[in-house]
Every structure is written in structure tokens, then in C-alpha cells.
Image (tube, grey):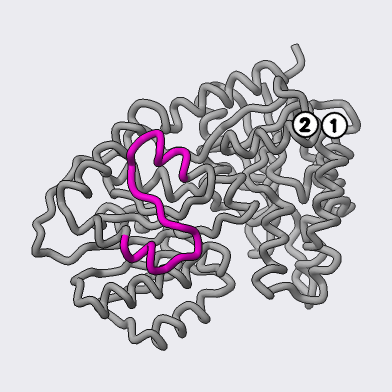
Amino acid sequence: MRVLYVWDADYPWDVRTEKICLALTQAGHDVVIAARNRNGSPRREVLPEGIVERLPAFRFPAGSWLSFPAFFNPIWLRHLRRVALRYRVDVILVRDVPLAPAALLASRGQWPVVLDMAENYPAMMADIWTDGRAKLLDLLVRNPKIVAAVERRTLPHAAHIITVVEESSDRVVRLGVPEERVSVVSNTPPVNSVVALGTRTPDEPLRIVYLGLMEEHRGVGELLVAAHELETAGIDFVLDMVGDGRDYADIRRRATDLGLAAPRIVFHGRLPHRDAIAVLRRGHVGVVPHHARESWNTTIPNKLFDYMAAGLAVVSSDAAPAARVIGETGAGLLFRSGDASDLSAKLRQMLNCETWDRHRKSGQKAVLSRYNWEFDTRVLLDVVSRIAPT
């Protein structure tokens, strides 16, 4: 089978895109990845997970806007149609809402289109406005009402919808998609990412890790306040902050204002995936502080499962999907979304080595038994086999 995967940014790299495409390739399918090209990469590149076919690199002022993943961008439409015909694809998988209309138009009913809904995109756009980060151009390209309207019009025409969590599937069904056309392929790690557990003594610093984008709606500000409370209480800890994002500079300034500095807090910035996982494996507790808004109540972050596989106990906000998984597995503790003092209190509970050890073992057990990429790969391959024309 020949599969076209549509990714709306430069590639490499994206963890979900690589995992899905590599799973398809290893199952014997031919995969082509259509991607943006702001970095001036070669138009065509062969990678283990598939052949990358990139847009032209527009090397003039504001040229990158020509390749912006807008719903009906004619440059994307032409590229997708050309690549699909050249490689004689059988199925198109398109990542998230922005390029779903372009993929459907490029298909012209010739190939089934599967929407890989990794995010609740309208809610994610709403977060930009709630956080006060919207700009004038966002009235058109990131307007939550427009995005929601496009999503509603797009969903009925997709042959199948892949979501990352049950709560997202429930939302799609409420929007009118039949249950049999919705499947969950979550952002889980492979079984071989589960590491042997180390030890920890009560007198060593508690190593706390945050992995992900530095953005307000992800609750990073509350994590800094919680860390300040721990320091004020005389608790010995190290906070590793891995990632960047649009609020990165503001978050670093806030840490300074709170008196948090190295070696108490370490800002690693964005790291290659392998290096980021290495930081996790040195840690004791992984934090998921995301605000329990609609966006995080209908999606689940990769970091939750990465923490569990790496042998970290988890402290998470009570956003619905993460709360459900932690409640089912016993992988950690929950705090009230937006409540830095409650987060601080839950982190203090992890100072107890028996509590910490119980939760981290439960998390790893859950990854080995259910929340692993091998399980989700089976769902993915089943969807593609059922959707592809015979």
C-alpha cells in the first residue's frame, strides 16, 4: 500500500509523524511525507520512515507565507495533488485541521483521506487568544471560530478520524461523526523505552522535570511558583526545564523574579529527542501542569507516557485525560489545575521514597501492559487496512 502523510511544518522532525510513518514502513507500506520547507532543505529526501517531498523554499522577504498551511492554500493543493499522483498513493493521512481541506480537495474523491487529529485545534487556537498572545494576522489564520467552522465542515468528508485519546474521540462523535469512523492512536512510547529503575535515597535532592513547550496555558507559571514555595520551605530539589516556546523568555524572567537560579533550576532549552529523554531518565518526578481548559481536557501530552516509561512518578493537573490515565494506572498524583500551592503539596508527597517508588513502578507497569506504541501501532495498521481501497 502507498500512503501519503501530510505534515504542515518542516520535516524532520516531529515525533508523532516519525512514529506513524515508520510503523507503516516497517509493516511493508510505502510512505511519502509532504512537508513545508522554510529551512531550504532538499526538495526530496529519503529517510527510514519514508520519502520526504517538500514544498519549494521561497527565498525572499515574507516568502514563507506562501507555504503557510492555510486551509485552501493553492500551493499546498498543487503539491499534494502532484505528489499523490506521482507516487500513485492509495491513502492520504493528513495531520490536524489546517491542511485537511487541502488534502480533501487534492484527493477529489480519488483517495480516502484520514484525519490524524493530534490536537483539538479550535481549542488550541482559543488558548492563544486567552493567553493574550494573538496578533492582528491571527484574526484570519488562527481565529478559533473560523477554525471550528472549517473543522465541522471537514469531518464529515474524512474517511476516518484518528485521535490521541478517548476524550477527543468523544468530542468528534458529538460533532456528528459515527463512532465506527473514529479510532484512538495515542502518543505512547515503545516498550523498549522502559528503563531499569534506579534507586533514590531520602537525603538526595528531588529531581523534578518538565518537558514540553513553555506556554502559559501549559501551566509552567504555576510550576515556577510551586518551585519557589519548595525553596522557601527549605526543600532540596532540582528543577529541569526542557523545551522552548513562545513564552520561553517570559518564563525565564519570571524564574529570575522568583529568585530561582542554577543549580536549583536548569533551563535546557530545546534538546534533540534523545537528549531530552536522557534528562528525564535522571529525574525522579515528571510534572504535567497543563491548565484544565477544553484543549487539555480533550488531548493528552506525550510527556505523560514518556515520564512513565522513564520511571518517573507523575504529578499532573486534573485535566481530564491525564487524570483518567493516572487514576487508572496509579502512576502519580493529581493537583487542582492552576493551583501552585496544591502542586507544591503534591511534590512534597513525592519526598517520601515509598510513595514515589509505588507510583513510578505503577507507571512503568502500565506502559508495558497497555500504554505503548506497539498497542497503538496495531490500531493504526487496522485503520489503514480497512480504509484503503481493495
Numbered circle sitting on residue 116: none
* Residue 380 appears left or right of 278: right
| Of marks 2 and 1, the one in the foreground | 1
Residue 40 located left or right of residue 18 = right
Which residues are the magenta region? 323-345
What residue is disc 1 on?
Answer: 157
Mark found first going from the N terminus, 2 or 1: 2
For the point 17% across and 54% down, the residue is 352
Quarter of the figure with the C terminus: top right
Quarter occupied by residue 153: top right
What's the residue at 29%, 49% (across, down)?
Answer: 313
Q: CA distance from mark 2 to mark 1?
A: 8 Å
The local secondary structure at tag 1 comes to helix
User: For the residue carrying disc 1, how many other residues have a C-alpha within 10 Å: few (<14), some (14-19), or many (20+)?
Assistant: some
Residue 146: name its quadrant.
Answer: bottom right
Who's the residue at 20% across and 40% down the image?
A: 196
Residues at circles 2 and 1 in contact by the CB criterion of under 8 Å: yes
Q: Amino acid at mark 1?
A: His
The percent position of residue 337, horizontal first and vertical second, equals: 49, 59
- Tell me, yes or no, if residue 85 can be seen here: no
Q: Is residue 32 magenta?
A: no
| Disc 2 residue type (three-letter) | Val
Q: Nearer the viewer, residue 31 or 332?
A: 332
- Answer few, some or many: residues within 10 Å of disc 2's Cα (few below 14, many 20 plus, some between 14 and 19): many
- Residue at the limit of the structure toward the top, as seen here: 390
Q: Nearer the viewer, residue 337 or 149?
A: 337
- The image shows residue 22 at horizontal and vertical percentages of 52, 34
Please state which of residues 238 and 46 is positioned toward the viewer in this rendering: 238
User: Is-magenta flag for residue 338?
Assistant: yes
**Residue 373 visible to the viewer:** yes
Numbered tag placed on residue 113 in the rendering? 2
Dot 2 lies on which element?
strand
